[in-house]
Image: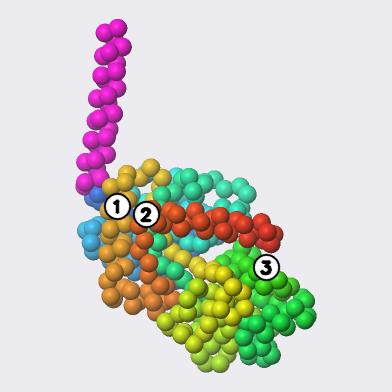
Amino acid sequence: MRTSRNNAILACIAVLAATGTRGVAAQRYPDHPIRFVVGFSAGGNSDIVARLLGQKVSQYVGQPVIVDNRPGAASNIAAEIVAKAPPDGYTILLGSISLATNATLYTKLNYDALRDLAAVTQLSVNPYMLVIHPSLPVKNVKELIALAKAKPGYLSYASAGSGSGAHLFAELFRDMAGINIVHVPYKGSPPATTDVVSGHVPMQFDNVITALPLAKTGKLRPLAVTTVKRLSIAPDVPTIAETGVPDYNANSWFGVFAPASTPKDVIAKLHAEFVKALQTQELRERLLVLGNDPVGSTPEEYSKFFRAEVAKWASVIKKVGVKVD
């Protein structure tokens, strides 16, 4: 009886000691460099966003925030690295809409984003724009839909590849508008945009930061933006929802994740520093120029948002039968 009691006491002491150790570790956090894993190549929008925020957060916490580019498999390589990393806050992920769509697009993943990752904060919303080649005889979304219905399969659209945000945004549009348009996948956004500008493909959903300059020079005609509200940088361009497809809403985004089971006080520390960075006027202006509208949500808000994104795009992918190459 005494032995059982002693064992119970020892177990309690062990639990308290472990809890205390985690608490002390969290109080010291961070005491060495933080690894910020990005699932895309250096030089792109995601990489630039990670580096801008990493530099600012590094100033606040007194430790380097080192961007580690691990491109490949639509960011699944990077996500798996973070999902399997020690839950101590020293390995974090720059998540994007790919993290939400990959959960359905790929049937065999070595991680579960909903189970293995903890939301820290949504960094930004990245709106897209529906653009067409100027030779196409339509002036707005309603006329585009009318043309597509009059000539099923006549219109085609370019995307950065099967399963990309641009592909899914177009498929959601096709489904909600009840039209038949043909997907032309490319290996990345630049070649897709090049062929739309040249007139080889008549339309495309593209990131606003890429599409807007081409629209302003007359190389492309902007029909609508994918957001619920019009954009401050393009106030004359209506939303898809107000010009032909009610309730349409589709955006890319960036956010920060840590491994699941990361202590709550470490998550809170990361959240506080990233939000502080997002609130600086200098950084906000630089993000807006890149087409990233800053957010800075709480971990709870971001977790709810992410789960909703996974469910939303799972429904779209299954309904329209999107498959990756």
* Residue 54 vs residue 272, the one in the foreground: 272
Q: Is residue 196 visible?
A: no
Count of marks overlaid on the render: 3
Residue 6 image-quadrant placement: top left
Direction from residue 183 to residue 126 in the image, left or right: left
- Residue to which mark 1 is pinned: 268
Query: Could you tell me which residue is drawn at 71 percent across and 71 percent down?
Result: 178
Colour scheme of the picture: rainbow
Residue 4, given in percent of the width and then of the height, sits at 31, 11
The reply to whether dot 2 and dot 1 touch (C-beta < 8 Å) is yes
**Quarter containing the N terminus:** top left
Q: In terms of sequence position, does the residue under pointer 2 or pointer 1 come before the other?
A: 1
Query: Could you tell me which residue is drawn at 28 percent across and 58 percent down?
Result: 272
* Residue segment shown in magenta: 1-28
Residue 155 image-quadrant placement: bottom right
Direction from residue 182 to residue 32 in the image, left or right: left
* Residue 119 vs residue 73, the one in the foreground: 119
* Residue 234 vs residue 217, the one in the foreground: 234
The residue at the far top in this view is: 1
Q: Which mark is residue 175?
A: 3
Q: In terms of sequence position, does the residue under pointer 3 or pointer 1 come before the other?
A: 3
Mark 1 residue type:
Ala
Indicate the secondary structure of the residue bearing disc 1.
Answer: helix
Residue 5, given in percent of the width and then of the height, sits at 27, 13
Q: Is residue 253 magenta?
A: no
Indicate the secondary structure of the residue bearing disc 2.
Answer: helix
Q: Which mark is residue 299?
A: 2
Nearer to us of marks 3 and 1 is 3
The reply to whether dot 3 and dot 2 touch (C-beta < 8 Å) is no
Query: Could you tell me which residue is drawn at 32 percent across and 51 percent down?
Result: 267
Residue 285, given in percent of the width and then of the height, sits at 33, 77
